Amino acid sequence: GESVGLHLPTLSVQEGDNSIINCAYSNSASDYFIWYKQESGKGPQFIIDIRSNMDKRQGQRVTVLLNKTVKHLSLQIAATQPGDSAVYFCAEWYGNAGNMLTFGGGTRLMVKP
Amino acid sequence: DGGITQSPKYLFRKEGQNVTLSCEQNLNHDAMYWYRQDPGQGLRLIYYSQIVNDFQKGDIAEGYSVSREKKESFPLTVTSAQKNPTAFYLCASSIGTGEAFFGQGTRLTVV
């Protein structure tokens, strides 16, 4: 079936640099896309979301970009800090499937001091 | 404090036993979800519920069962039919339009 997917990578960045984490999705009917951060042994935490009718949304140090033409979602983290080290997941939500929230495979971000 | 609570944090099961994982939320959310996470992997949807007394199967429902008798509670039973139940189980709730709040998870181990 259709799904959100990440090729799981480990992204290593220097402290202070910007990070970009990517996600490819295949369900063009999704209403929302959401980024979560998961630290080891804990539940995922919401970072930022974007509606399907938007192409960019900014939060504090984070920006999500949505390119519906190529079905691509990205999370940009500015001035990456050691506390940003975690696994990041993108997820998609679509109401037509009964409010189902499905996740991609995740990217591990490692911040080098 | 408002939030979503999973218990227990760690659970050990003997082969052939059923076990039930608890998930309670006081956020007044209609939708609740159960996910399974294997080491180094993403979250796979087991079951979800949009409203009391209603729930739907996710991608990997075989060997699991749920109930939704109260809005606040969405317990997950891992049955003996689940052949490889060792995993990290996450419960979440949402208002139904996107953002979900997660509990801290239950780590289930078969001994």
Image (cartoon, rainbow, N blue to C red):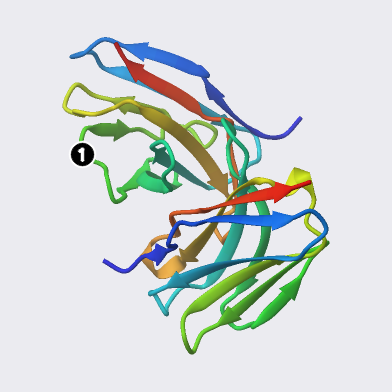
Q: In the image, what residue occupies the spot 21% across and 32% down? A: B63
Residue A54 is situated, as x and y percent measured from the top left of the image, at 64, 82
The type of residue carrying mark 1 is Glu
Which residue is nearer to you in this view: B99 or A73?
A73
> Could you tell me which residue is drawn at 57 percent across and 50 percent down?
B94
| Total marks in image | 1
- Can you tell which quarter of the image residue A103 is in? bottom left
Which percent across, then down, holds residue A65?
64, 77
From the top left corner, tell me how far across and down residue B53 is, in percent: 38, 40
In this image, A58 relative to B83: left or right? right
Task: Note whether B72 is above or below B19 in the view shown.
Answer: below
Residue bearing mark 1: B62
Q: Is residue A4 left or right of residue A56?
A: left
Q: Reply above or below: A102 against B30.
A: below
Q: Horizontal placement of A14 versus B57: left or right?
A: right
Is residue A54 visible to us here? yes
* The C terminus of chain B: image quadrant: top left
Q: Nearer the viewer, residue A88 or B97?
A: A88
Residue B99 visible in the displayed image:
no
Quarter of the image with the N terminus of chain B is top right
Q: Mark 1: few, some, or many residues within 10 Å (few <14, many ≥20)? A: some
Q: Name the element at disc 1.
A: loop
Chain letter behind tag 1 = B
The answer to whether A66 is drawn above or below residue A36 in the figure is below
Left or right of B63 in this view: A8? right
Position of residue B104 measured from the top left corner of the image (x, y, whole percent): 58, 30
Report the residue at 49% width, 53% height from top.
Answer: A106
Residue pictured at 76% horizontal, 43% vertical: A83
Pick the residue in front: B36 or A93.
Answer: B36
